[in-house]
Image (cartoon, grey):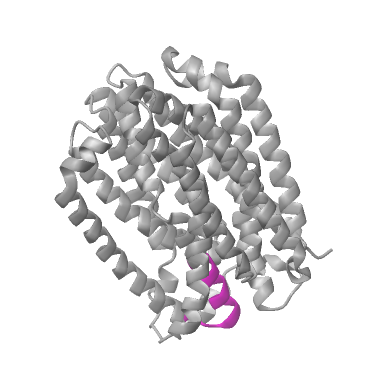
Amino acid sequence: MPAEKIQSNPAPAAFTHPHAAFFRQSGWLMVANVGGGFFMLVVHFLAKSKHMSPAEYGAFGVMLAVAMCVPNMPLQMVFAQQTARALATGRERQLAGMIRLAWLGTFGLAGLCALGVWLWQGDILAAWKLTSATGLWITVVVVLFSLWMPMFWGVLQGQQNFFWLGWSNILNGAGRFAMAAVLVLLAGWASVGMITGVCLGLVVAVGVSIWQTRGVWRLPAEPFKWRELLSQIVPLLLGFGALQFFFTADTMFVKAYFSDDDAGFYIGAGTLSRALLWLVLPLAAVMFPKIVHSAVRSEKSSLLGMVLLGTGILAACGALGLTVLGPWIIKIVFKNSFVQVASAVLPWYAWAMVPLSLANVLVNNLLARSQFRIVPVLVALAVAYGFALTQFHGSLVTVLKTLGVFNLLLLAACGWFTWRDKSAAPKS
């Protein structure tokens, strides 16, 4: 496919009416996120199955957390940024070479992961309290596809091809639920069946994304400047990697420090609380390539204020809803044994997501504009947060208080870096 055809992709033309296009695209991604998220949520209804004890559900939670720790957020944002920059500057063939090289590199990473599992399988099974190695090896495959998915989702996002980005999300969730339901309810595979469903959902989502981005990665490759590329990629990886750590680390620490049952209750509350992100993350996802495009072309953008306001309202309303209706929702989704503990931690969890959602918007804005001075602070806060979790884990609520405090610190740091520099402030 010639470069001219890629550049004529209708999505970037949305700058003619930026606000109308933004609401249409973010609205569709919200629908897609809610749809895909709904299927991912109802997977957790399988926790009520007779085959699924709290310990088995906790085992699934830790295997899922491993997949969540794959740096999918930084990978997606790197490819979104590079794709948006390439389309804005006519460097599509350099982008094709970068995609193919990264694609090849993921095989090496997955191979190292498999080697580590083979060498330390017994230690891993004991540390995570897993009764079977089958789920562990399926998790290795999940890691591979979890590396591929953000690469090609990033290309779709950078192209502003939000239509297929949304459908890939929906198919990921639908495939996960359909296969997990069959394997748990009919085959009685418990946690292994659930992680297999995750794997097959990823296969479908990645296949769709690879096909829809073939016009970019199949172009004849051209050499690119390594130093210039690394000067953009490394800060993005570090910055968004630190942000992802805030999204996922608490689950692994809880699994390590608490009983299997408590970990299962905590993961149940976390599943409902993180559902808030399905509503608010699309706003930042649509904003990011538009800000990259505007920054490369030195154009003004007024998106930040609008996205920040919308994110705050949606996140606060969602947290309030979970605080009021949480016990009732938990009874529907999980077994009765989950209600007492999960209901107690749910309000803390839900409100801890609000500052994290706002910080996510500010980080997206700063890094889209290549304002990388925030990156060392993000990394330092992530390290401090990880250390704090090793010290303050007397109860599940203590873990969530630690999460909430560090999310507020993260938001304060992002706000200070956003408004200290006029070039990063929203333009009216």
| Residue 160 drawn above or below residue 168 | below
Coordinates of residue 410 in the picture (x, y in percent): 62, 51
Residue at 78%, 69% in the rendered image: 422
Main secondary-structure element of the magenta-colored stretch: helix
Residue at horizontal 50 percent and vertical 15 percent from the top: 340
Q: Quick one: quadrant of the N terminus? A: bottom left
Image point (48%, 19%), residue name: 341
Q: Position of residue 310 (x, y in %)?
A: 73, 46
Give the residue furthest to the front. 391
> Residue 171 at what x, y percent from top left?
42, 45
398 vs 103, nearest the viewer: 398
Figure label count = 0
Residue 86 in magenta stretch: yes
Q: Is residue 93 above or below residue 119?
A: below
Question: Does 258 appear in magenta?
Answer: no
The magenta segment: 79-92
Q: Is residue 303 left or right of residue 34?
A: right
Q: Say whether residue 200 is visible.
A: yes
Of the 4 image quadrants, the one containing the C terminus is: bottom right
Quadrant position of residue 292: bottom right
Give the residue furthest to the right.
428
Does the rendering let one see residue 289? no
Which x, y percent locates residue 144?
30, 55
Q: Quadrant of residue 65?
A: top left
Residue 224, picture quadrant: bottom left
